[in-house]
Amino acid sequence: MSDEVCVCKQSFDSLLCFTQSSFGFLTWMVVCITFSMAHALPTKSSCLAVGPEIPDFHTQGELVVIRFPFLEDAILYLRLLVDNSTFHISHSEQHDLQNDTVRVIQRGRSLWLLPSHPSDSGTYSYVLSSDMFCITGSISVTIYETGREDLDMMSYPVSAQPDTDLNISCPHIKHFIMAGSPQWYKGFNVGAFPLISTRYKREKGNLLTITKVSPEDKGLYTCKLKVIFNHTHYNVSRTWKLQVLASAILYPYITTPVNGSMIESHFGSSLVIQCKVLVGNQSYDHTEVTWLVNGRSVDSSYLSERAFQATRRVLPNHVVVELVFLEVHEEDTRVELKCVAQNLSGKQEVITQVTLEDSMTMWLVVAAVSSCFFLLVMSVFLYQLCPTSPKRNNYIRARQNSSF
């Protein structure tokens, strides 16, 4: 007669034990730990969790496009075929966004607010799914009432060295049809005034050039733009907060992350680390920014299956390259992550590391494994107490339960 053991399959909702023949002790432990660890991965309802996205901030009454850049990076990295997929967006406060189909419109994998209201503030979660995959994520959006904006949260930081030229831009205009030229203001709202100095030049498109930046130029710069969507006019805007550096620095200069810093994360969660490089008066195209893992490129490192270097983004006077972890594992805390920036002016390297925060997930894993050990002991103990039934009685009971 073969041995019988009770194999445990534990989830956060239930505990199921079933009988399986010919399971040895080692096999039993592998099954228990596998089921336990599976629930520590960054999944939600069997979907891969990405993000969360970088929070977004706007003023009420403007046209707002809510997008999910980290999701788009994951689609490209995983080479997902999304033609036959479904994309659903939900709001943390409004259970059904589809009820307001005139003002809230979903276009592809983005959501348009026409226009935005303070009540739109909250967390927007999405699920992208097909027969082959499922991805979920979220973004926090805050819509401030007019006159009650938090400028530190809303404004985009930018820095420049004295006597250099700086380009800053309006909102992304590729989503809109412009209904006029952008209007630039120094300051914000009531305290703003039009830029009329000869040092402020409106370049083609949506760029503003500040020539020979001086300490007096520091502060807020707001671009206001009128756009047309579905034959209706809307306002969009963007505010930059300029910091003028007090002393000369060597380029390229990595402003984020700080050398020797520790980036906190949770086991099994996704993580995005930005490398933000100030290029000065050098060309963006000639500035290379690369992430290295223990001295190797991300694609050739042990992280190649669950991390990637995202496509570089160009901001005013900066280049940003992100290192994206789809999952953070414990061994990631023991590696050296290095951002390397290089152009004709020189080279700079910054080293950072990942550290894990204490999380409830780890305690759940420990509890699950401990439960497996306990159930193993109990199953062996109960098996020893159970008398072995004669084969003859087993045969009679089987005949009684048969359909013949």
Image: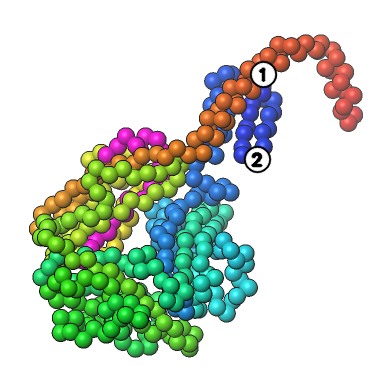
- Residue shown at 84%/12% (left/top)? 392
Horizontal side of 372 relative to 172 (left or right) equals right
Q: Nearer the viewer, residue 140 or 60?
A: 60
The image's mark for residue 13 is 2
Picture quarter with the N terminus: top right
> Which residues are the magenta region?
316-336
Q: Determine the image quadrant of residue 342.
A: bottom left
Q: Identify the secondary structure beneath mark 2.
A: loop
Position in image of residue 71 (x %, y %): 44, 58
Position in image of residue 306 (x %, y %): 39, 45
Label 2 Cα neighbours within 10 Å, binned few <14 / some 14-19 / many ≥20: few
Mark 1 belongs to which amino acid? Answer: Met
Q: CA distance from mark 1 to mark 2?
A: 21 Å
Q: Is residue 342 above or below residue 217?
A: above
Horizontal side of 399 relative to 381 (left or right) equals right
Q: Is residue 137 above or below residue 360?
A: below
Q: What colour-coding does the image apply?
A: rainbow
Mark 2 belongs to which amino acid? Answer: Asp
Horizontal side of 374 relative to 214 (left or right) equals right
Q: Nearer the viewer, residue 220 or 107?
A: 220
Reading the image, the residue beneath label 1 is 378
Let me know if residue 327 is in the magenta part: yes
